[in-house]
Amino acid sequence: MTQPNPQATIQDMFPQSVAVLSQPSVAAFERFERRGGTREAAIYVLLAALVSGLIAGFFAVFHSDVTVLGQFFSRLVQTILGFGIFTGLVYLVGRGIFKGTGTYPEVAYTFALFFVPISIVSTVIGVIPVLGWLVSWLLSLVTVYFGFLAVQSSMNLRDTVQAAVTLVLSGIGYLVVLAVLGSLFLLR
């Protein structure tokens, strides 16, 4: 077993992302899940959030109904907060309902390895009218597949039904949290 490496850097994580994306399997995720933790995942996700925010901010110039700073900061907050909420739910559901033995740092790091590159590609392609929407939708399906593998690896849930239910319940919980947060902001 690989020991946690609190010194994992973005330069370490890029090849790890390439490995899990090019050879999708539970074993590929298992190879890297303990090479970093929550801090490294947060830094990597922050990178994706910054790229997404910069791209959204740049393209806001071409739209009169949004602002550059508004787009930048909303993408920054949404990406980081969304990642934290979703991975937290994966951990809580996997651990609480199915008695998964993974840790939150393993979940966060494992999910960051595929989330960051897919998020960046989706943002870049998403600015292309129609084609961007279609490709982004397809990338969403790919993200679900990688999420399924990451749940199996990071929570040590080899039963496919348990892993799938963990992912689905986490997704539903995520949508509920977003709806609650959205309604709180609308009430102000």
Image: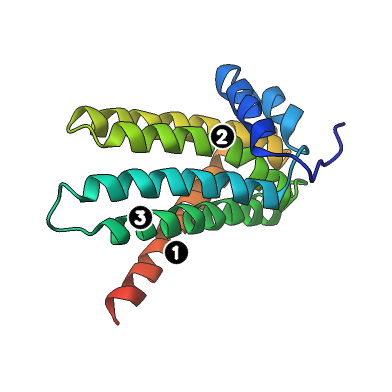
The residue depicted at 19 percent of the width and 50 percent of the height is 61
Q: Is residue 177 above or below residue 161?
A: below
Under circle 2, the secondary element is helix
**Among numbered discs 3 and 2, the one appearing first in the sequence:** 3
Res 148 label: 2
Q: CA distance from mark 1 to mark 2?
A: 21 Å
**Mark 1 belongs to which amino acid?**
Val
Under circle 1, the secondary element is helix
**Mark 2 belongs to which amino acid?**
Phe
Which quarter shows the C terminus?
Answer: bottom left
**Among numbered discs 1 and 2, the one appearing first in the sequence:** 2
Res 72 label: 3
Q: What is the crowding at mark 3: few (fewer than 14 residues within 10 Å), some, or many (at least 20)?
A: many
Which quarter shows the N terminus?
Answer: top right
Q: Which residue is mark 1?
A: 177
The residue depicted at 25 percent of the width and 37 percent of the height is 127
The residue depicted at 79 percent of the width and 46 percent of the height is 6
Residue 122's image quarter?
A: top left
The residue depicted at 15 percent of the width and 46 percent of the height is 62
